[in-house]
Amino acid sequence: MDDSQFEPHALVVEDDPDVRDLAAALLEETELDVVDVESAEGALAYLQEHGSNVALIFADIRLAGPMDGVQLAKAVCTLWPTIRIVLTSGAAGGRLNEMPDCVTFMPKPWRGLDILVEAERAIRQPKAPVA
């Protein structure tokens, strides 16, 4: 792919439509094109087609469907290691110790500024490809 055509994306993964819309609206204020899905399975389907364009994934830990955000993060860290991942939850409980090292955790209620900071990091400080 021609690097001049690279347009970084943010992928919002949240099953609550109000929270998903709020996070997407915040991220639309950045340089990132925003795509939102309601499940980890939807995220993986999107990543299979467009993974090389995704700079940031912002996902809830608790998601509808068979996969949760922690499982999604583990898959993304393995298959797309250059993507910055932010997981959020208001009730992470014991799941915090299950998160891979590549994940940033942001407790709910999160602040809009915190999301914008992570988006800026994804744009300005992309993870290096695995050698």
Image (spheres, rainbow, N blue to C red):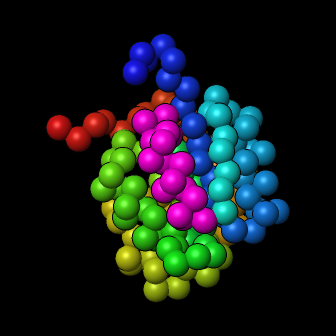
Say whether residue 66 is magenta: no
Q: Is residue 128 visible?
A: yes
Between residue 114 and residue 21, name the one nearer to us: 21
Write down the quadrant of residue 9 in the picture.
top right
Magenta region: which residues? 39-54
Q: Which quadrant holds the N terminus?
A: top left
Q: Quadrant of the C terminus?
A: top left
Q: Residue furthest left?
A: 131
Provide residue 65's location: percent of width, then percent of height: 58, 76
Write down the quadrant of residue 22 in the picture: bottom right
Residue sitting at x 48%, y 56%: 44
Q: Is residue 59 in view? A: no
Residue sitting farthest toward the bottom: 94
* Residue ranking furthest to the right: 18
Judged left or right of residue 59, residue 81 is: left
Query: Residue 52 magenta-drawn?
Result: yes
Q: Is residue 2 above or below residue 127?
A: above
Q: Main secondary structure of the magenta part?
A: helix
| x, y percent for residue 116 | 65, 43
Q: Residue at x 38, y 78 (%)?
A: 97
Picture residue at 65% right of the left edge, 34% below the top: 33
- Place residue 14 in its image quadrant: bottom right
